[in-house]
Image (cartoon, grey):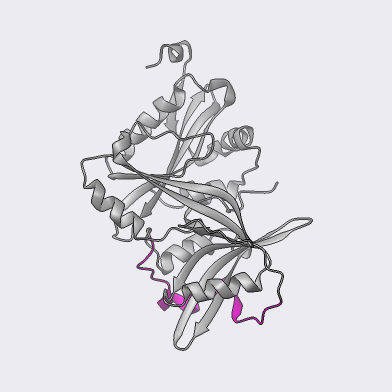
Amino acid sequence: MNSKLKNFHFIYRKLKISDYKEFKKLFYSCFKRNISFDFFKWRYFSNRSSFCYGVFVSSKLIANVGMVSVKLNNNEKIYSRHSSMVLKKYRNIGIFSELLKIVKNKVSKKTNLIIMWPNKNNFAKFGINKNKIINKKYYLYETSSTSKFLKHTKNIEIDELIKFKDYTKNKNSFFLKNFVYYKNRYLTYRKKDYFINRFDKGNLKSFFIIKVNKGKSYINYVILDHFGSEKIKSKHLSDLIMEKKKLIFLSKKKINKAKFKLLNYLYLKIGILKQSNIKQKKNYMLNKEIYLGDTDVFITLGER
């Protein structure tokens, strides 16, 4: 243990739902964003496997890491790291490293993989050797269309998702995607934020799940997920780009076009905890799709 940590009395424990107020304070202090009780409950207490683990000084939460239980498309259970944060006063003394060691020990008994979405201030790797971490860089773009384009797509209320249940299984997704996934992800928390965009070509059907972001002086549309035919997905996206003035989407490749503005980069890190075939895992990841709905980037956390 870092010698500086011996000067403090820290309590390491799993958060309870009654710790919401402390979680909210720490989250705002670190990210300057409010987080609702509904989000806290939905993200970390909607299933028995997901959890938050924190560090307390007396009753004050000063560090946290959230672990969300998810499945890969091969049904392998893994954990995805969210809400990693440390109160500024307690940074750079090794406290987060100690916290990650504890969490790593707990999840390693249940899984061989940890998914990490590092932010600009946090690239902590759970102490996993770098040669056991698979890295992938993604590009976040916003389009700007000014032309009037005859609409070929149709917007549908998210509540109608059940009608398309037979199309929801997605074999090309990195994470397991089926009707249960879409129901839990888009119908159980702030469902009014989302709608389905449908595109038909012959007997084929393609569906994007989209979130609308509205501000005082702007509106944009964020593509969060896709299901349905992969054969017409690119045509669907092309038409949608022409129909929406501001469309945000994630790309595996860099795009050099005048009407595509690069907003940011997203990094996905997959940490392998035990001995495994890293080359096989890497090939699997590179051949599968990741969507913005797999992250918390565009989830509405609470009232601003």
* Residue at 42% in and 52% down: 47
Tell which of 45 and 198 is nearer to you. 198
Tell which of 291 and 12 is nearer to you. 291
Q: Where is residue 258 shown, x and y percent of the image?
A: 63, 61
Tell which of 133 and 261 is nearer to you. 261
Task: Indicate whether residue 16 is drawn in magenta.
Answer: no
* Residue at 58% in and 21% down: 89
Task: Indicate whether residue 161 is drawn in magenta.
Answer: yes
Asked if residue 294 lies left or right of residue 240, the reply is left
For the N terminus, the quadrant is top left
Q: Where is residue 8 shown, x and y percent of the image?
A: 48, 14
Q: Is residue 185 above or below residue 108?
A: below
Q: Is residue 244 visible?
A: yes
Q: Is residue 170 above or below residue 100?
A: below
Numbered range of the magenta stretch? 148-173
Q: Where is residue 58 shown, x and y percent of the image?
A: 53, 21
Q: Is residue 75 above or below residue 90?
A: below
Q: Is residue 157 visible?
A: no
- Residue furthest toward the bottom? 202
* Residue at 51% in and 83% down: 200
Asked if residue 181 lies left or right of residue 276, the reply is right
